[in-house]
Amino acid sequence: MKLDILAFGAHPDDVELGCGGTLAKEIANGKRVGIIDLTKGELGTRGTEFTRKEEAANAAKILGVQVRENLGFADGFFVNDKTHQLEIIKMLRKYQPEIVLCNAIDDRHIDHGKGSKLVSDACFLSGLVKIETTLNAKRQDKWRPKQVYHYIQWKTIEPDFVVDISSYIDVKMQSVMAYKTQFYDPENKEAETPITSKNFLDSIKYRANDLGRLINSDYAEGFTAERYVAVESLFNLK
């Protein structure tokens, strides 16, 4: 199955938090979108890998993605090496996305920066014909995405461009709240973490609101690019 966009996240919920509105918008515009989670989020303070699996499936349904897979890398301990790169390359060659979205290049959680570099490196390597991979006993063709963009997470990073998600903020928030064990819930008596506060939950929307304000819209999501963003004409800019 060929996809237009393949979004990677170090943990289930990274994609929803970072670019859920953008994915919902592109899906509504007819694009085929998939999500690849690198880990099961098994080190998360709240919930378990099994609740995260169920939550991720529910979030995928809310967004309307074509496919969601989990590579089962070790939460907190995966590294950017040949073994892990090859697993990413297999996914890139399997789905042949034009655009890849992945974690922030620098962030509070160590897996985010690691996941960002791992996916970015694999996107380059996937285009090399002499790197051989097989899937279901069939040799895969080389594939390199046209663009790799990084969504913004915990840290405030100046975006290279933003996407207007004003009509999709509710879908984004619904997909985030599908992870009911992970975020603010006054009835949950498990240990508190930085992402379980009401302030964090509110910040998802007010950050999008602030980015939207800067482009004269209601809500937006920001991304950083690995190379210059080109447009055909000045009139393509909003």
Image (spheres, rainbow, N blue to C red):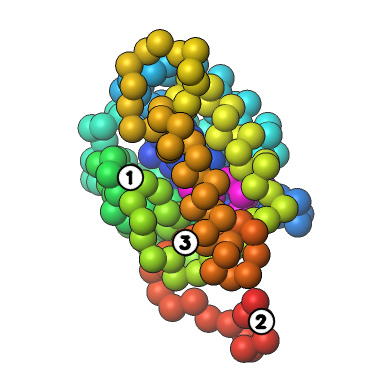
Q: Is residue 175 magenta?
A: no
Q: Secondary structure at mark 1?
A: helix
- The amino acid marked with disc number 3 is Phe
Disc number placed over residue 223 in the picture, else none: 3
* Mark 1 vs mark 2, CA separation in Å: 32 Å
Q: Secondary structure at mark 2?
A: helix
Quadrant of the rendered structure where residue 121 is? bottom left
Q: Which of marks 1 and 3 precedes in the sequence?
A: 1
Quadrant of the rendered structure where residue 192 is? top left
Residue marked by disc 2: 236
Q: Which of marks 3 and 2 precedes in the sequence?
A: 3
18 or 12: nearer the eye? 18
* Residue sitting at x 65%, y 77%: 238
* Residue 140: % across, % down: 50, 49
In this view, which residue lies farthest toward the bottom? 234
* Residue sitting at x 58%, y 62%: 212
Q: Main secondary structure of the magenta part?
A: helix
Q: Residues within 10 Å of mark 2 (few under 14, many from 20)?
A: few
Residue marked by disc 1: 112
On the rendered structure, is 41 left or right of 113?
Answer: right
On the rendered structure, is 176 left or right of 26?
Answer: left
* Residue 218: % across, % down: 64, 59
- The amino acid marked with disc number 2 is Asn
What range of the chain is rendered magenta?
Answer: 18-24
